[in-house]
Image (cartoon, rainbow, N blue to C red):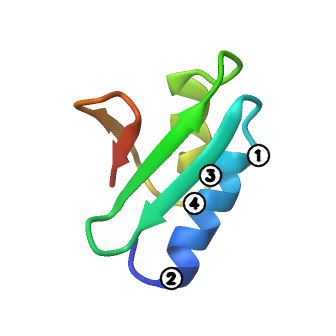
Amino acid sequence: MHCPLCTAMVRGAILKVDGAVEARATLNDKKVKIITNEGATKQSLLDVIKTTGYEGKFIEDNQSIDF
C-alpha cells in the first residue's frame, strides 16, 4: 500500500466480505488487522484483497495480513 487511498480501498474491500466485522489498515507497516466472525474465511479475505491489486498473506496471529 502506497497512500491513504490504498489503505481505504483495501479496508473497504475487506469489509464487504461476509463475516468481516472490522478492518484497520495502516500505511506505516502495510498491514491490516481484521476482526471477523465465523462467516469469513482466510481465502475469502485474500481473494478480496487481490481485487484491489495487492497480494496478502496471514502472519502470526492469523488476523493480520501483510502486504
Horizontal side, residue 60 vs residue 2: left or right = left
* Residue located beneath label 1 in the image: 16
Q: Nearer the viewer, residue 62 or 44?
A: 62
> Horizontal placement of 39 versus 60: left or right?
right
Judge by depth and name the residue closer to the eye, 25 or 56: 25
Instruction: Give the residue type at disc 1.
Output: Lys
* Residue carrying label 4: 10
Marked residue nearer the N-terminal end (4 or 2)? 2
Q: Give whichever of discs 3 and 4 has the lower sequence position.
A: 4
Other residues around mark 3 within 10 Å, as few (<14) / some (14–19) / many (≥20): few
Q: Quadrant of residue 61?
A: top left
Give the Cα distance between marks 1 and 4: 10 Å
Q: Which residue is mark 3?
A: 51
- Measured as percent of width and height from the top left, residue 48 is found at 62, 43
Please tell me which residue is depicted at 58% across the width and 21% down the height of the picture: 41
Number of the label disc, if any, that sits on residue 4: 2
SS assignment at label 4 = helix
Percent across and percent down for residue 59 are 26, 35
